[in-house]
Image: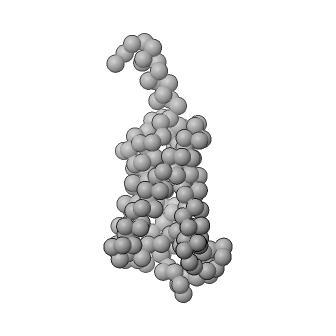
């Protein structure tokens, strides 16, 4: 597995996801995973805490990218946006359950930060839509950015043999 490529693919996909969540906030949907992550260890909010949360989110996305890469390498033996979007279903299931448990461990939920609930259901239909879209986009980007070693070897063999 190509760990560095998987890490950077996850970080890039996470950055796009962060942008989508920012657009959702501009549209009035109170999705703020970055603030929830950043404030968890410090029990306070603010711009610096939000930036810390973004960094934690991107690091986590890089680690999730490793899991997607393992799936591309070991399960599907190929990638692509469709394969990545399909793999996002497992990512959604785990993330949705973990978001549901966040309220039980986060000291600022619901006093200062909106409780997302499982699959962001507590944020209404918009929250669920953001949850689904961001995960599918993350998976599709991972599938587009990460190329499994098996695919590379196949392309090299085709080039060597002279097949189109």
Q: In this view, does 25 lie above or below 145?
A: below
Q: Which residue is depicted at the point 45% across and 14% down?
A: 160
Residue 101 falls left or right of residue 13: right
Q: Residue furthest front?
A: 48
Residue positioned most to the top: 161
View extreme (bottom): residue: 111
Image quarter in which the N terminus is found: top right
Q: Whole-percent x and y of residue 70? A: 55, 42
Looking at the image, residue 157 sits to the left or right of residue 108; the answer is left
- x, y (%) of residue 143? 43, 43
Specify how the rendered protein is coloured: one colour
Give the answer, above or below, for where 48 lies relative to 7.
below
Relative to residue 99, is residue 4 depicted above or below? above
Q: Please state which of residues 51 and 144 is positioned toward the viewer in this rendering.
A: 51
Residue 39 lies left or right of residue 19; in this view the side is right
Residue 87 visible to the viewer = no
**Residue at point 34%, 18% (across, down):** 164
Asked if one can make out residue 113 in the rendered structure from this viewpoint, the answer is: yes
Please determine whether, in this image, residue 123 is positioned above or below residue 87. below
Q: Give the image location of residue 37, x and y in percent.
A: 57, 69
Q: Please give the name of the residue rendered at 54% of the width and 64% of the height, measured from the top-left corner.
A: 54
Count up the numbered dots. Answer: 0
Residue at x 53%, y 84% (from the top left corner): 112
């Amino acid at each position: 597995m190509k760990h560095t490529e998987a890490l950077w693919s996850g970080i890039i996909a996470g950055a796009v996801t962060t942008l989508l969540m920012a657009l959702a906030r501009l549209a009035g949907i109170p999705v703020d995973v970055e603030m929830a992550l950043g404030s968890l260890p410090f029990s306070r909010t603010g711009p610096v805490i939000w930036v810390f949360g973004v960094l934690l989110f991107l690091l986590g996305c890089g680690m999730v990218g490793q899991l997607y890469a393992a799936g591309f390498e070991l399960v599907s033996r190929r990638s692509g946006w469709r394969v990545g979007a399909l793999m996002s279903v497992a990512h959604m299931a785990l993330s949705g359950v973990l978001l549901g448990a966040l309220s039980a461990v986060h000291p600022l939920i619901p006093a200062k930060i909106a409780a997302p609930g499982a699959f962001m259901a507590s944020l209404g239909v918009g929250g669920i839509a953001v949850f689904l879209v961001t995960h599918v986009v993350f998976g599709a980007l991972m599938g587009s950015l990460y190329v499994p070693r098996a695919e590379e070897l196949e392309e090299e063999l085709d080039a060597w043999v002279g097949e189109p």
